[in-house]
Amino acid sequence: MTPLRHRMIEDLQLKGYSDSTQTLYVTAVRQLCEHFDKSPGKITEENLQDYFLYGKNVKKWSRSTSTVALCGIKFFYENAIKRPWPTLLFIRPGREKKLPVVLSRDEVHELLRNIRLLRYRVCLTTIYSCGLRLSEGTHLKVEDIDGDRGFISIRHSKGHMGNKDRNVPLPVFIGGLCRWGQTLIID
């Protein structure tokens, strides 16, 4: 491991970035260096502009790929080698204008009804009816559910440091429907 990569990893750790973010950022810098076949200290602002144009126009990077590359490279230059570059302030990936896929109540009912193992059906029903992220639902423990107060405690929720807790209200079920209109299917 090169001294610069080691310094970048230490800086990421000191700032509390998750292991997965550290890996993504280090990979972004490595790919930049491989693209130009240069060490990062020899890469110019013009090289950076060319690299992000290449990612946008040739590789057709998604917004998230472009954002990770930008954030990782910017972090490296500003923290590991202390070289702020104005170019990095002006590069911004465009916003995606995609509508989310929304299933109808019947489609959700059919999907959950076809899950054979009860534990998976209960887990996915909880994730859906409470609006949880998948990782939040899979890490949920029985002791996190407070039926008396009507909420679920989500531990280590999403965030760049992964240490945010939050409470999510339990849905109130009336006649088989929760207050948001989703059908509870546990058969």
Image (cartoon, rainbow, N blue to C red):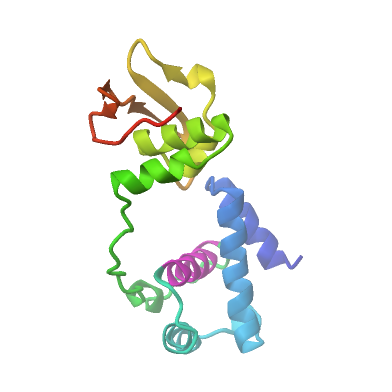
Decide if residue 128 is on the left or right side of residue 7. left
- Residue 14 screen position, x and y as percent: 57, 47
Q: Looking at the image, which is closer to me, 130 or 22? A: 130
Please report the residue visible at 51 percent of the width from the left and 70 percent of the height from the top.
Answer: 73
**Residue lying farthest top?**
148
Quarter of the image for residue 139 reads top right
Q: Position of residue 78 (x, y in %)?
A: 49, 65
Q: Quadrant of the N terminus?
A: bottom right
Q: Is residue 148 left or right of residue 83?
A: left
Residue 153 in view in this figure: yes
* Image: magenta residue range: 64-79
Asked if residue 180 is positioned above or below residue 33 in the image, the reply reads above
Q: Is residue 23 above or below residue 141?
A: below
Q: Nearer the viewer, residue 80 or 156?
A: 156
Residue 80 picture location, percent across and down = 58, 63
Residue 163 in sight from this viewpoint: no
Which residue is at 54% across, 45% downward? Answer: 16
- Does the magenta-highlighted stretch encompass residue 53? no
Residue 88 on image: x %, y %: 40, 74
* For residue 2, above or below residue 177: below
Is residue 157 positioned above or below 24 on the image?
A: above
Residue 154, quarter of the rendered image: top left
